[in-house]
């Protein structure tokens, strides 16, 4: 399902049951954590992990729709673009590595873009956004480069830096696949290989869940034409679309590779099991006639040489002859 576009005025429209400024006041116990950079008439406002205090600050300073505030409070929104008369509301998902579980998860980045401002509201720490913000805050040259061409270009740099951070993750995933390919044929690492294949397969699945729904959103972002996203910026947003398509192609390739590695590893394991079963079968068959000779000699019947040493050695010779004959036959058939 593609991105949702609404052409609506940017004034706040109260609905029955929606939060008002008065409703939020009792919930606020601290000052809002608001960071701002202003350059050449453009403001970049960053509100990390926004809570009731930050929402109240936004309501006092901007006229955004109540539905957008609901989306900011929610933690399970799909990537989308909502277009209003005087601003854009954008939701994107970024891949972050969760060290607690050792896997990739999706973090949400909400953004408001207007004629003279860009507001970023990450629901957790996003290093690409944080690093870019700190560079713009502390370096005049970076601030001039990123913020002097209007909010549309600033939006491009934020999204571009965020998505560029995906490529090192994808390259690391490719290195994991190469390492698994080398480890598959090492017998002592069979269990570790199964575990590694499962982990990297889960990473690929999670990454695909992040990239898939955003491809349509990024294509739509490329087509959005408003006075704060100039037409000459189309080529920049087209570059982001190309990057997302390259990521998707890499993930498709990784998906095929990991499935092939999984099949290969299963074949290797099956081959090892077959070797063990063949050895046990040959061992059992080799000792079957020896057991038969020994059990016959131990029966309560009279046979030539019974009770003499020659009879014993005759039985041993018969066993050795049977064992040698079967070994020769098995070798000729290629079973040993």
Image: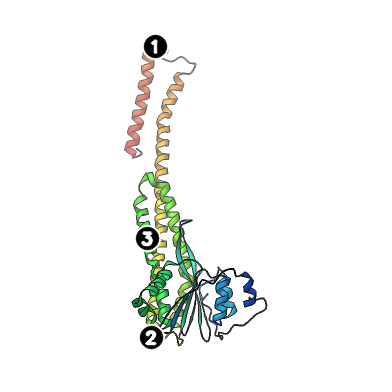
**Extreme residue toward the top, this view:** 308
Q: Nearer the viewer, residue 115 or 24?
A: 24
Binning the other alpha carbons within 10 Å of mark 3 as few (below 14), some (14 to 19) or many (20 upward) gives: few
The residues bearing labels 2 and 1 have C-alpha atoms spaced at a distance of 108 Å
Which picture quadrant has residue 25? bottom right
Is label 1 or label 3 in front?
A: 3
The residue to which callout 1 is attached is 308
Q: Which mark is residue 172?
A: 3
Distance in Å between CA atoms under marks 3 and 2: 35 Å
Q: Residue at x 42, y 23 (%)?
A: 293
Mark nearer the N terminus (1 vs 3): 3
Tell me, yes or no, if residue 294 can be seen here: yes
- Colouring method of the image: rainbow
Residue for point 59% across, 82% down: 12
Instruction: List x then y, in percent, for residue 229.
Output: 43, 84
Residue matched to label 2: 232
Could you tell me which secondary element the residue under label 3 belongs to? helix
User: In the structure shown, which secondary structural element does the residue marked by tag 1 occupy?
Assistant: loop
Residue 244 visible, this orientation: no
**Is the Cβ of the residue at disc 3 closer than 8 Å to that at disc 2?**
no
Residue 59 point in image, percent of width and height: 57, 79
Quick one: label 2 or label 1, which is nearer the N terminus? Answer: 2
């Amino acid at each position: 399902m593609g991105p949702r576009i609404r052409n609506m005025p940017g004034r706040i429209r109260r609905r029955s049951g929606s939060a008002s400024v008065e409703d939020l006041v009792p919930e606020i116990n601290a000052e809002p954590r608001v960071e701002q950079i202003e350059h050449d008439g453009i403001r970049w406002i960053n509100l990390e992990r926004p809570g009731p205090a930050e929402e109240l600050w936004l309501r006092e300073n901007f006229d955004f729709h109540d539905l957008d505030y609901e989306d900011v409070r929610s933690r399970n929104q799909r990537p989308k673009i909502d277009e209003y008369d005087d601003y854009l509301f954008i939701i994107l998902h970024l891949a972050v590595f969760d060290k607690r579980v050792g896997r990739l998860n999706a973090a949400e980045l909400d953004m408001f873009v207007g004629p003279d401002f860009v507001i970023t509201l990450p629901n957790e720490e996003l290093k690409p956004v944080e690093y870019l913000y700190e560079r713009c805050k502390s370096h005049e040259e970076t601030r001039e480069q990123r913020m002097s061409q209007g909010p549309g270009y600033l939006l491009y740099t934020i999204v571009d830096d965020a998505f560029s951070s995906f490529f090192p993750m994808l390259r690391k995933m490719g290195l994991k696949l190469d390492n698994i390919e080398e480890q598959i044929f090492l017998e002592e690492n069979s269990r570790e290989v199964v575990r590694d294949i499962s982990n990297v397969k889960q990473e690929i699945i999670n990454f695909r869940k992040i990239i898939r729904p955003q491809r349509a959103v990024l294509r739509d972002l490329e087509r959005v034409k408003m006075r704060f996203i100039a037409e000459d910026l189309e080529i920049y947003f087209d570059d982001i679309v190309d990057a997302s398509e390259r990521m998707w192609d890499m993930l498709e390739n990784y998906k095929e590779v990991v499935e092939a590695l999984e099949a290969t590893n299963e074949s290797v394991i099956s081959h090892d099991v077959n070797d063990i079963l063949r050895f046990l079968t040959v061992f059992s068959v080799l000792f079957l006639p020896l057991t038969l000779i020994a059990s016959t000699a131990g029966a309560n019947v009279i046979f030539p040489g019974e009770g003499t040493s020659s009879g014993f050695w005759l039985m041993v010779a018969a066993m050795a002859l049977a064992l040698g004959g079967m070994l020769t036959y098995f070798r000729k058939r290629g079973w040993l």
